[in-house]
Every structure is written in structure tokens, then in C-alpha cells.
Image (cartoon, rainbow, N blue to C red):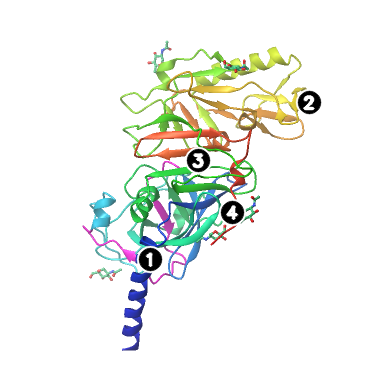
Amino acid sequence: MTSSFYHHLFIFSLLISTTFAATNTRPKALVFPVSKDSTTLQYIVPITQRTPPKRVPTTLHLGGPLVWVDCDRGYVSSTYCPARCNSAPCTLANSISCGSCNAPPGPGCNNNTCGLSPQNPITNIATSGELASDVVRVNSTTGLNPGPIVKATNFLFSCGPTFLLKGLAKGVQGVIGLGRTKISPVFQLSSTFSFPKKFAVCLSSSSSNGVIFFGDAPFQFYPPTDLNSLKYTPLITNPTTPTEYFIGVTSIKVDNTTVPINKSLLFINKKGNGGTKLSTIIPYTLIETSIFKALTTSFDKRLKQQFPEAKRVNGVAPFDVCYDSNTLTSTRVGVVVPDIQLVLQNNNVVWTIYASNSIVTIDANVRCLALVDSGMNPKTSIVLGGYQLEDNFMQFDLAKSRLGFNYLVFRTRCSNFNFTSVA
Ligand SMILES: *[C@@H]1O[C@H](CO)[C@@H](O)[C@H](O)[C@H]1NC(C)=O
Ligand SMILES: *[C@@H]1O[C@H](CO)[C@@H](O)[C@H](O)[C@H]1NC(C)=O
Ligand SMILES: *[C@@H]1O[C@H](CO)[C@@H](O)[C@H](O)[C@H]1NC(C)=O
Ligand SMILES: *[C@@H]1O[C@H](CO)[C@@H](O)[C@H](O)[C@H]1NC(C)=O
Ligand SMILES: *[C@@H]1O[C@H](CO)[C@@H](O)[C@H](O)[C@H]1NC(C)=O
């Protein structure tokens, strides 16, 4: 009797808070911090999930299809809800499987549930897992600070086993995939809170947090910075990996001089090979051998033209092109090297990789070009990795299928979002 009373009271209060969240405090945008694990170089996003709420650190997988967490170890929640076979969540997730479980029932192990494969993007190991929903709490934002916390009551995710965490950063309990699927957080949160299907990622180059936003608002970093002046380029879909984000690089330049490459490698062919993808899983940009050779040759030639004293030294794995730091020229703002320009749909839309994103310091004597040769026949010709994405504000607009981007360093940094809560 008592327990049933509390049960009803509980449901009643849930309904009230959901309604409240949906009307009075409908947020324009949501905000998450994103940190970098210094050992694995993975980007970590904490999700506040379950009842009572628990902070669940996850590895960011920009093009990943779903959110999954370890449900085997320490998953306690009164609001966990497995997705029953053929229910609406299964349809949304495109899951036609119907599974059962022989172990004791609990989160991740229920009969008559549909499944969705969680995958570890580092090891590429995938397994079967139960689709489920639970409560997720997120800070809303007006663009300036984190604001009141809002609740998404039926946030869908997949359950993974503990062993699937192998290869992920220490303390991480899952993966947050932001790829193009109907169950990715951007689709779920935009439908829960009725905001546009947009999210923005700003990865920090320091040990301070970067930031991820869902929805849209006049986002601000201090000192006050106008982020309206984004450059836009179409997001391209690769039919063989449709959840991932590709952009259309059409040529590469070093300090405005075109690098001679086989341009057909820059386009995605019928087999889904080629093209340029954005990845938060790869720490340093991977480039197909012939493009890598041409680009690094042009870079080295141009550097020595400007600074004849620049001296190459042996490569330091995984980098091939390294210099004696004492022979490089530095100014107040850092080392001076040629710009690497990825020309997009036309000559006015260029993604420039400046020194802070192209040069990595190995030790007091050696600095390397932070690009990695990915061999002769990689599936994707250029995979832009984390180091090259840092301090770029990147807004993914899925309705318009375009990427807005802006390099912040001349004015601010991705670590300069003001995380002081004004809730
Ligand atoms: C699933 O159903 C089978 C057969 O009825 C039963 O033996 C098993 O315990 C059930 N598992 C769960 C997790 O409920
Ligand atoms: C490249 O071209 C732009 C625009 O024409 C110019 O402003 C810039 O100074 C050039 N950069 C170099 C390194 O020549
Ligand atoms: C350019 O690359 C494409 C795709 O790999 C290849 O088929 C073609 O033969 C290459 N062309 C030249 C001139 O090397
Ligand atoms: C961050 O926001 C808080 C709360 O609005 C404010 O007091 C503080 O001055 C801000 N800090 C910076 C560096 O802008
Ligand atoms: C909301 O933001 C504050 C300040 O950054 C943070 O301490 C808190 O953990 C956040 N809450 C959630 C649910 O993410």
C-alpha cells in the first residue's frame, strides 16, 4: 500500500517536472564541458544520467552512431527502461532485432528488448547490446554561462558490457556518438526541447575544458567574441559510413601555393573511398601517402625558403617531419611556420591550419609537423584529427547539412567559455 502510494507520487512528480521542463524553462541550447585525457588524447564528455543522477564520463566520437554506456558494472537507476521489441524507440533506432537474456535481469539484460550494437571506436570491437532509455540532466545555456538544469526523461542509449571499455581513457564508462542518426543526442535533444538540429564542438588545446553546445544561442567566449562570422561548407555524406561527417576539400595550399596532388583522392568514390573526414578519435591528422609526401615536401621547401637555417632531424613516431627547435623562429605568439590551407568549395572558403595546430613540441630540442602518413590505400584520404580541430569553433547544422567554422585563436580560445553556473 505504502510503496504503491509512493510509486504514484513518484510518477506524478515526474510528470510535473517534465511538463515544467517543456514549457516554462524550454532552453534554447544545452552545454557540456569537454576535456582531453592526456594519456589517450581522447576527448571526454560527462553525461549526468540515471536516478539518482550519476556522472558518467564518455569518450567523444564525433561521427559515432549512438550513445552507449557500461551497464554491467554499477548501473543503478530507478528510471532505467529497456526498449520493448517493436516499440517506437526500436523503430527510431532502426533496430529490428528482438533479444532475450539468460543472466539475472537488470540494466542491459532483459527479455523481449530490441538490440543496438555498441562499438568501441578505438579498438573497433562491436558487440550486441540492449537499447534502453533513462533520464539525462543537462545544463541549459543562453550562450553565456551554464544555466538551470533541464531533464530529458527518455534519453535513448545502448548498453555495453564492461569489456567493451578496453582502450578507452581511464574512468570512461561509455562513448557519446554525435553522428547523423535519429538516436544521436542532437536529434533526441532537439526533439525533446524543440530546438534546431544543430550542435557545436569547440575542443580545447589546453588542460582547461572545451565546450559542446546543442541547439543554438548567441554563444560567447571571453573576451567578448562575435561568433556570427562563421565560414560555411557543405557536410558531405559518405554512403558507406553515413553517420560520419565529411567536408569537401578541393585542393591543398601551403602559404597560398597549391600543393601538386592527385585530386581524385579528395573525392569520395563509388566504393566510399577517398574524401576528408572530421574525427575526434584520431589524435593527429592522417593523410594518404602521396598527398602526405607532396604536402610535407611543399611545407619543408617553403619553411626553408623563409628560414634557411631551419634544420630537419629524424622523425619521432608517429611523425615523419621534425625539426631542431633551436633552428625554428618563434615570436611572442609562438613558432612561425607556413600555413596549411585546405581549400573547400571555392577559394574564399578555406580551413587554415596555423602553427598552433600544425606543430607539436616533442621535447626541448624537437618539434614535429603533427601530421601522420596513413599509407597507400587508406579508406579515407584525409582524416582531420583532434589536434588540428582544437580551438576551432565548429557548428554542425544537420537541417542545412553544413558546417560553420571559425578559428578562435586570434581573439579567444575554446577553453574560454565561462563555466560559472548562473542557475
Ligand atoms: C528470459 O526468459 C527466459 C525464459 O522464460 C527465462 O529463463 C530468463 O530468466 C528470462 N531472463 C530475464 C533476464 O528475464
Ligand atoms: C595569402 O593570400 C592572402 C589573400 O590574398 C594574403 O592576405 C596573405 O598574406 C597571403 N599569405 C601569404 C603567406 O603569402
Ligand atoms: C589518382 O588516384 C586515382 C584513385 O586512387 C587513381 O585511380 C589514378 O590512377 C591516380 N592518377 C594518377 C595520375 O596517379
Ligand atoms: C563568468 O560569469 C560569472 C557569472 O556571470 C561572472 O561573475 C564572471 O565575471 C565571468 N567571468 C569572466 C571571466 O567573464
Ligand atoms: C552544470 O554546470 C555546473 C557549472 O559548470 C556544473 O558544476 C554542473 O555539474 C553541471 N550540471 C550538470 C547536470 O551537468
Callout 4: few (<14), some (14-19), or many (20+) C-alpha neighbours within 10 Å? some
Residue 422 seen in render:
yes
Q: Which residue is mark 3?
A: 280
Whole-percent x, y for residue 347 in the image: 48, 18
Ranked by sequence position, the earlier of labels 1 and 4 is 1
Q: Which residues are magenta?
A: 62-87
Give how far apart the Cα atoms at labels 3 and 1 are.
35 Å
Q: Is residue 10 above or below residue 325?
A: below
Whole-percent x, y for residue 140 in the image: 47, 56
Q: Which residue is mark 1?
A: 20
**How many discs appear?**
4
Callout 2: few (<14), some (14-19), or many (20+) C-alpha neighbours within 10 Å? some
Q: Which residue is mark 4?
A: 419
In which quadrant of the rendered image does the N terminus lie? Answer: bottom left
| Residue at (35, 79) in percent of width and height | 9
Give how far apart the Cα atoms at labels 2 and 1 are.
61 Å
Give how far apart the Cα atoms at labels 4 and 3 are.
22 Å
The three-letter amino acid code for the residue at tag 4 is Phe
- Mark 3 or mark 1, which is nearer to you? 1
Q: Which residue is mark 2?
A: 326
Callout 1: few (<14), some (14-19), or many (20+) C-alpha neighbours within 10 Å? some
Q: Is residue 313 above or below residue 133?
A: above
Ranked by sequence position, the earlier of labels 4 and 2 is 2
Circle 3 SS class: loop
- Mark 4 or mark 2, which is nearer to you? 4
The three-letter amino acid code for the residue at tag 1 is Phe
Determine which of the numbered discs, if any, sits on residue 1 in the image. Answer: none
The three-letter amino acid code for the residue at tag 2 is Asn
